[in-house]
Image (tube, rainbow, N blue to C red):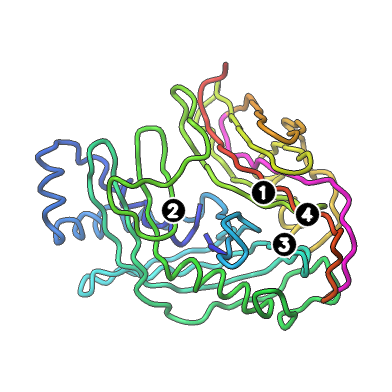
Amino acid sequence: MAAGRHALFLSVVALALGTSAVGCPCVKGAVNDSPSLRWWLFSNFGAQKVCPEVLKRGVPLKLQALGSSSIGRFFPQQCSVVVNDTTHTMIVNITGSGYASTEVTKRVGFYCGMSVEYRPDFRFEGDAMYVWGMFNRLMSQPDLRILGVENPLVNLATQTPVGSLATMLGQGIVTSEIGRGFTVVRQDDGDDFAMGILAPPDKPRRQFVSGTDHMVLASDVSEIRPQAREYLGPFEVPGNGQALFFKSRNDGSPIVSMVVDKQTGDAWRQSYETAQPLGPPPGPLLGSTTLQPGLGSQTVPLAKGQYYLVLENQQAAGFAPLGMPIPFTNAPTTVSYSTEVGDRP
């Protein structure tokens, strides 16, 4: 799983924010040619923006052994950064909570604290900026604690197809994702993220072509099991007169898509992480639609603010006793999606 639009990893997108004022091609060339200048720009302008970026949004959790789709999410709540000018590295310390869902464990909510050292770098390429976070070392083993479990027989020692639950979470957050490093490509219409180090001109794949004058906020694939949710965001709508635009490709059962404000979404998500029964949002529902199998879309006009887009698979879940999977247990639904913000139609 990736604990973090990939929190620990997106931290270095602050590089792009801190250096985007460097616009002249001649200056870009000088920056590209000078590692010491790139470090100076980051340490003086980018580092201070790391934690604000990290804390903005939840990040997909993925486990390579279970495929390329997200099976949960991690939401950073506290962050600090230590910059080392001697080694040109930064240590990112993050704590937060999240959830994951598999056939054996069902829904599991967890707390995680971690400390990771990266070697940040960036490069200007045409109309894009490539930002890299090269994994250097894990400062300590992640601090993992269970907040709630849907299956009462589950604990950190519970065996899953990829080892114990503790191993699944730990390897997903660290070995399978953080250890690969990451790439953020900043373009005029949004930032694209990918695990691993991509060299120009390669770019992370977008699930859909973005709308005219839209800013892409997220583009990924999620796996949503029966009676489970995916909390996307929170996404920022920067001004009044705008809307969130959601495009999807649904491979499975119908999915209900709902939009709530951040305060409502935070409380709703925390209830989900502690394995409370599924229920309505504890605040106003600002938009809702059912995404049928195949292509779908949703446009929700919103005021300036921050919002969650929540996907729920309301299909009844089949019962599979722990360690005894049943062949006809309902399969998860895979949703490819793109979330964008732009002027209202």
Callout 3: SS: strand
Is disc 4 surrounded by few (<14), some (14 to 19) or many (20+) residues within 10 Å?
some
- Name the residue at 21% across, 54% down: 41
Callout 2: SS: strand
Q: Earlier in the sequence, mark 4 or mark 2?
A: 2
Q: CA distance from mark 1 to mark 2?
A: 20 Å
Residue furthest toward the top? 345
The image position of residue 234, as x and y in percent, is 59, 45
- Name the residue at 72% across, 57% down: 270
Q: CA distance from mark 1 to mark 4?
A: 20 Å
- Name the residue at 48% across, 36% down: 216
For the magenta stretch, what is the residue range?
Answer: 304-321
Which residue is more in the foreground, 217 or 168? 168
Q: Amino acid at mark 1?
A: Tyr
- The residue singled out by tag 4 in the image is 331
Which part of the image, by quadrant, shows the N terminus?
Answer: bottom right
Say left or right for 64 vs 289.
Answer: left
Give residue 9's quadrant in the image: bottom left
Q: Earlier in the sequence, mark 1 or mark 4?
A: 1
- The residue singled out by tag 3 in the image is 101
Depicted 203 relative to depicted 151: above or below: above
Q: Earlier in the sequence, mark 4 or mark 3?
A: 3
Q: CA distance from mark 3 to mark 1?
A: 13 Å
Q: CA distance from mark 4 to mark 3?
A: 12 Å
The label on residue 245 is none
The label on residue 231 is 1
Is disc 3 surrounded by few (<14), some (14 to 19) or many (20+) residues within 10 Å?
many
The label on residue 194 is 2
Say left or right for 253 vs 297.
Answer: right
